[in-house]
Amino acid sequence: MMRRALQNTGWLMGARGINAVLSIVYLALATRALGLDGFGQFVIAFTFAQLVVGFTSFQTWQAVIRWGQDDEGRKQATGFALALDSVTIIVGAAAAALILLLAGDWLPIAPDLRMPTFLFTLASLISIRSTPTGLLRLHDKYARAAAADATTSIMRAIGAGIVVAVSPSITAFLLVWGIAELATAAMYWRMAARTEAIHWRSYSLARLPALQQGAWRFVVGTSLTGMLTIASRQLLVLLTGAIGGAALAGIYRVAAQLGEGLLKLAQAVLRAVYPELVRNPEGARALTGRITRIAIITGVLVVALGMLAGDWIIIAIAGDAYLAAYWPMILLAAAASLELAGASLEALLVASGRAITNFVLRAVPTVAGLLTLPWLIDWLGATGAALAVLVASTVSVAGFAIATREKPAKA
């Protein structure tokens, strides 16, 4: 089990590594082409779309793995996941349209960027790929998932190069990012269909919950947690822009792009380990402990590298104008290191059916951090926003460790 989990994690980390390298390319192109304020406006528009997706989407890949261990269960789980994805697209599109149409000056998106932002949001919603991701992971096709996942960064890097050479603008970058999302989703569905026929005829919101007691409780719990993990960070960027201006949002985004690379590795660990914990609950605790120890060492090394070479990295990629991202980058790298160490603990908690507990452990520190954000930004700027993330991650991971601690046997 350990070998397969590490192999699967390796495929995911390989894809993340490719994405990390290419993300540096398109980050450098976008920051230099748009300038500090223009890049900040682009970040706010991009973040709005990610926020809508984060708040309205379901973690359907976990449902596919949990109830898809046999042929009949897989049909029902896939149909249920497809129906949930449809709800996300409809609700998300309606919410985005209403917010962009009715929002006043409090939404830090310029009026001439609201239509491009809506179209990018719509592309992001249509590109939801949680269900095919679950099917690929269920069959241990992590190499195919890695190939599909790399499509995003490849398309962004190529598209960003073309935009810079032809006519750099915020709308052009949004167009490229939207095409990249659609291409990635198409690749995921193609890979999933090659692995197994997609069970469209089992499309239903009611069939699986009627067969599996607690299905809605599990889906709601995992989805709320996913919403917090994704949307809270996107909301933090949006609030940073609303409170401190587009330039500050751009600085924070650069810091996040460089400092939160480990967070993507943490998500890769969770996604690779979760199927193994579902299949073999008896060996779950031993696997979790070994992966956590590896994660701690990795996190410490990356934070140390950031502290030694952070200034040079920022100047080389984004330029002198973004040097204020140094301390936010270090704090976000530390937060991501904690998340990496806690990823297998979180997977263990969810695999044991305690999705609601997991959500609470995420929700309380996240909400507290967002509530203190105006004061922290006024005091420390982008560093204050990063500090809120670090404190929230520390509290959440400590909660995972306590919640998954093995109870001593009674004498």
Image (tube, rainbow, N blue to C red):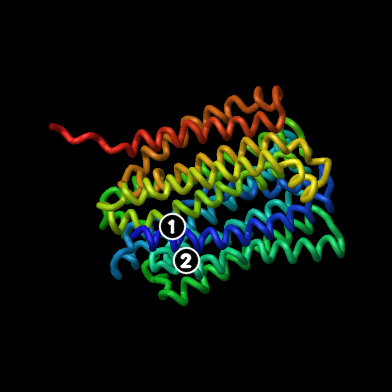
* Residue 11 image position (x, y, % from top left): 50, 63
Among the two numbered marks 1 and 2 on one chain, the one whose residue lies closer to the N terminus: 2
* Residue 57 image position (x, y, % from top left): 50, 51
Q: Please identify the quarter of the rendering in which residue 167 is found.
A: bottom right
Secondary structure state at the residue bearing disc 2: helix
Label 1, label 2: how far apart the Cα atoms are: 8 Å
Image: 21 above or below 350: below
Q: Quadrant of the C terminus?
A: top left
Instruction: Mark 1: give few (<14), some (14-19) or many (20+) Cα within 10 Å.
Output: many
Does any portion of residue 219 appear in the rendered image? Answer: yes
Q: Are marks 1 and 2 in contact (CB under 8 Å)?
A: yes
Image: 131 above or below 224: below
Q: Which residue in the structure is indicated by mark 1?
A: 272
Seen at 57% across and 63% down, the residue is 149
Q: Which residue lies most toward the left here?
A: 411
In the displayed structure, does residue 325 sit left or right of residue 275?
right
